[in-house]
Amino acid sequence: MQYPYSLFVSDSNDVYIDNGYSNLQVDRRSPNSTNSTAAMFVCEACYGLFIDINDNIYCSMYNAHKVVSRSLKSRLNVFNVVAGTGSSGYTATTLYGPNGIFVDTNLDLYVADYGNSRIQKFATGQLSATTINTGPIVLNGPIGVLLDANGYLYIADDYNHRIIGSDQNGFRCIAACNGLTTSASNALYFPTGISFDSYGNLYAVDWGNSRVQKFTLLTSLCSKLIRIRESLIFYFIHCL
């Protein structure tokens, strides 16, 4: 395996890893196993991976400007195009360098349309998307996208070096909002992947600083407001 771009851990703790660069496939590794099997054959690397509640696996193809999907329940390696046309563009049906993806419980697909600096929402079964309105927040190279348990959207805004999120009042910056591109604990430098743990804490891959940052969820008992606190968790290490 060379240059894996993404991974996804399923509810059964199987790990799905992009292996498109060298082998044109997505690998699956089960818990306590040292061997991988091919879960999906693809045309190129998957910059984003996701598995929905119906065991469909999704792969966003940056250079092919599309997102494809197939059922893990099927023995046939036949995937369907679920977003994008294969040509770059700025229309409701096209994408330009899609990266992070997320599928909610309604099977709506959210795509970080990196080259177009927008988040596209494809309703179930639809190839024409609506653009998420981020209000006064202007995106610049969104690269990671996810929803929390309440349906609020979070975005890794890569070239703005920050994380933004939504609530009942709309979108606002929630982490690294000072515009710094340093290694300070309250800064990010080209953040890429983002994910929540079971406690609601947010983790961000701080690519430019070669580290992962943890932002702790703090809930005020008095005001019921949610704040984010920055804390450095760990630097990347090589694993055997």
Image (tube, grey):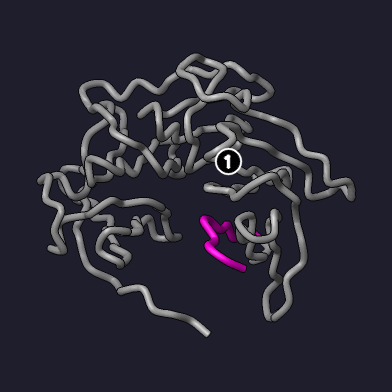
Q: Residue at x 36, y 37 (%)?
A: 142
Residue 11 horizontal side relative to residue 95, left or right:
right
Q: Position of residue 175 (x, y in %)?
A: 21, 48
Q: Is residue 10 magenta?
A: yes
Label 1: which residue?
60
Query: Which SS does the magenta portion mostly show?
Result: loop
Residue 86 horizontal/vertical position (percent): 62, 27
Seen at 31% across and 33% down, the residue is: 167
Which residue does the image show at 26% across and 21% down from the upper left? 135
Q: Is residue 32 left or right of residue 73?
A: left
Residue 223, located in which quarter of the rendered image? top left
| Observer-nearest of 63 and 211 | 63
Which residue does the image show at 32% across and 59% down from the upper left?
A: 207
Image quarter (top left, top right, bottom left or bottom right) of the N terminus: bottom right
Quarter where residue 67 is shown = top right
Magenta residue span: 1-11
Most distant residue in the bottom direction: 240
